[in-house]
């Protein structure tokens, strides 16, 4: 299957198959505690965070390659989603904007835009770590 067909198909599957009931808005803690992510979802999240960290420490030149790798990790993350209920809804509040940032970074035309979007992606993972474990 062509890669340009795989990602949209996975996104559709993700949003409809894992019963997304999330409401737009701020992410909430679980009674003051971080939400637990199911074990199968942790490796792609950790791999993405390492890619971002390594990229930040490196030459920061190949944004397109970074996006490809991050989207591959998202495909693994989505396919391993078994979360339900409030924790699932709260994860969607983080994941959807993160995925939008990746799409935007994939389509930037200037170095300035790339840098700004990369910084937002870094901040997104800081937010993730504030609310999830």
Image (cartoon, rainbow, N blue to C red):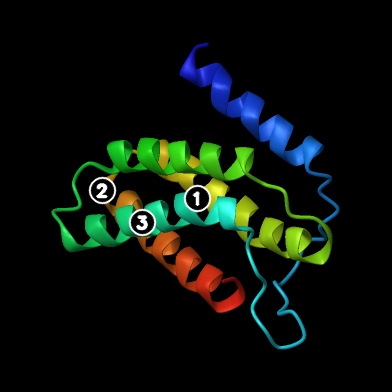
Between 69 and 110, the one lying in front of the other is 69
- Tell me which corner region of the image, top left, top right, bottom left or bottom right, holds residue 97: bottom right
Answer with mark 1 or mark 3, whichever residue precedes in sequence.
Answer: 1
Question: Left of 131 or right of it: where is 29?
Answer: right
Q: Mark 3 and mark 1 in contact (Cβ < 8 Å)?
A: no
- Marks 1, 2: nearer the viewer: 1
Q: Is residue 70 left or right of residue 30?
A: left
Q: Is residue 34 visible?
A: yes
In this view, the mark in front (2 or 3): 3
Q: CA distance from mark 1 to mark 3?
A: 8 Å
Which residue position is annotated with label 2? 111
Classify residue 60 as left or right of residue 97. left
Residue 97 seen from this side: no
Question: Considering only vertical position in the picture, is 117 above or below 76?
Answer: below
Q: Which residue is mark 3?
A: 118
Disc on the earlier residue, 2 or 3 = 2
Relative image position of residue 48 (x, y in whole percent): 40, 52
Rounded to the nearest whole Å, what is the CA distance between mark 2 and mark 3? Answer: 10 Å
> At 56% across and 45% down in the image, what residue appears?
77
Residue at 49%, 64% in the rendered image: 124
Tag shown at residue 101 = 1
């Amino acid at each position: 299957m062509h890669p340009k067909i795989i990602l949209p198909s996975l996104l559709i599957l993700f949003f409809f198959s894992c019963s997304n009931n999330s409401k737009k808005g701020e992410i909430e803690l679980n009674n003051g505690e971080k939400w637990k992510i199911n074990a199968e979802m942790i490796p792609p999240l950790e791999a993405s965070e390492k890619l971002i960290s390594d990229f930040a420490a490196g030459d920061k030149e190949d944004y397109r390659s970074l996006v490809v790798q991050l989207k591959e990790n998202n495909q693994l993350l989505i396919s391993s989603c078994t979360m339900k209920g409030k924790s699932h809804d709260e994860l969607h509040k983080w994941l959807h904007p993160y995925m939008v940032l990746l799409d935007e970074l994939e389509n930037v035309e200037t170095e300035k835009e790339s840098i700004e979007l990369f910084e937002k992606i870094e901040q997104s993972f800081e937010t993730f770590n504030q609310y999830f474990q």
